[in-house]
Amino acid sequence: MRCILIICIAFAMTPFISTAQNRYDVLITEFLADPSPSVGLPESSFIELKNRSSRDVNLRNWKIGNASSPATIKTDFILKADSFLILCPSSSASAYSRFGVALGITGFPSLGNDAGDIILSSDSGRVLHAIHYEKSWFENELKAGGGWSLEMIDPSNPCTAKGNWTASISSTGGTPGKKNSVDEGNPDEQSPGLVRAVTLDSLSLILLFDEPVDSSSSSSTRNYTVSDGIGSPLSALPSQPFFDRVSIHLQNPLNTGKIYTVSTQQILDCSGNEIGPRNECKAGVPEKVKGRDIIFNEVLFNPAPYGYDYIELYNGSSKIINCSGLYLAGKNTDGSLKDPLVLVKEEHAFFPGEYLLLTENPDWVLKNYPMSPPARMLSLSSMPSMPDDMGKIVLLNVSGETLDELDYDHRWHSPLLVNESGVSLERIRAGLPTSLPFNWTSASAASGYGTPGYKNSESSADSILSNFISVESKIFSPDMDGYQDFCFINYQLPSAGYMGSISVYDMYGRMVRKLVNNILWGTSGGFRWDGLDDQQNLLPIGHYVIYVELFMPDGTILKKKMVCVLARR
């Protein structure tokens, strides 16, 4: 009896060691991706773990690193409750032991300086914590250059990514093995949002959320509904390692050519916030893309100093298009392609009537063009070379067929611009060919000189009046405010083969502008007048006559005079 009592006492005095851990019981709370130049820490990367549970845990056979090449902890190590551990290369363990408890790992994972994944999983393969970090998290160019760690602000808010991480403020460049220098309350009060749906096939969808979601609520099929009679799915499965996507399998197939709405409810994030108004997205089966289904709609090739180029695409078709089959390239003077770039590596649906922005730095775009919708941006690792004076860019499908090609020229900018830097070129009409110089102009001053990801400030409707030629708008003010800056001459001819000219006269009968001089016209299209004379000077306000003369080889002649008003605020 006495022996049994001793055994019981000994067991009671032994700390409880757990192997099975709940998600977020052990966290990644700090890491140093770029250790050079050193501010005070060893010139070696590290990852800090914190056991925020009430139980000790043995880390043997746990894995740390990215999904493709994780490192395994091959020895017994008891991470005590509410304690820190510094993981580092075996060669750096001695140096880091001066800062706290350190464990050297053979094959310590390589941490990218600009971006990367860090995934912590238990011996059973369960993901405890995972982050995808980016250099922008530093929000400090000096510290982003190396030697400073990124620290989690609030360990009780592990789901928030960039909003809960920042550069260390410690004089040594980091605080491995102890409470972070930036430690403070930073609760997650933001509801999760449904970003988009990826269609794998007519019965399988992946739903992407803007943050990790709770496994229990996101696994409930009753929390999802697909419109047009599809209903709730048969199954819903949240995906490791980031838990920001859920795979659903439908009871009824989606029909090609139809756009559906996926609705969600009662989905929680890991802080318990319930999904709010951003609870719906579109879905559908992608179709094969063909020429001019997608067009170039806006380009910024001469950004302000320290800025970034961008290219905007527009889906003018009635198709849902998969962006993973699209490529962007520059073009050499001999017509050969320069370094084609795939737009996305995973499925990304591009819906009819939508805009899609391509750039290397979405954060810069959002900062400088705050109206831009983040969901319509694709971050590219690089962009085609886009010289400030002129250049060629091409959009291709996976078969190498050209979908659209833009041979831009800085002379397409408005002559009224004092400085072209930071001003995008916008397409005026989607229905006219991309190559027409008069179909492009400078973004308006009122729009901030760019409209990335949404309707152009200088866009014009494609409707043509029933008469063979018409003016739109009859009153225009060429002041670069984005409202009726041009006078458009639209035409729809009864047949092809017309040659024609357009002249502009003032009210004294003097010709002030030869807009078009004996060129071959198509059956439909348009021209624009910017209020300038032949010497590119802005004309005074007043009434002007636009005279159009068309003729056919058989002697048919069409003439028309129209009056417009050049106004100014």
Image: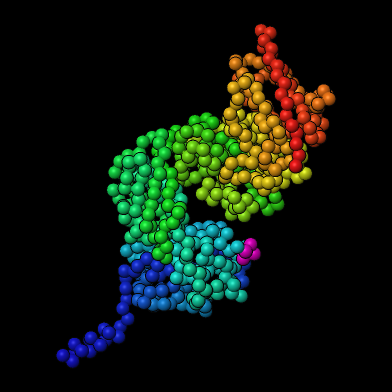
| Residue 18: percent from left, percent from top | 32, 73
Q: Is any atom of residue 134 visible in this view?
A: yes
Quadrant in which the N terminus appears? bottom left
| Residue 495: percent from left, percent from top | 60, 15
Judged by its main secondary structure, the magenta piece is helix
Identify whether 97 is placed above or below 295: below
Q: Is any atom of residue 303 visible in this view?
A: no
| Residue 484: percent from left, percent from top | 68, 37
Quadrant in which the C terminus appears? top right
Q: Residue at x 46, y 51 (%)?
A: 195
Residue 127 located within the stretch drawn in magenta: no
Q: Nearer the viewer, residue 369 or 492?
A: 492
Q: Residue at x 72, y 46 (%)?
A: 421
Residue extending farthest to the top is 554
Residue extending farthest to the left is 1
- Which residues are the magenta region? 140-144
Q: Nearer the viewer, residue 67 or 298?
A: 298
Identify whether 376 is placed above or below 530: below
Image quarter of residue 169: bottom right
Q: Residue at x 57, y 70 (%)?
A: 168
Q: Nearer the viewer, residue 518 or 143?
A: 518
Identify whether 56 is placed above or below 528: below
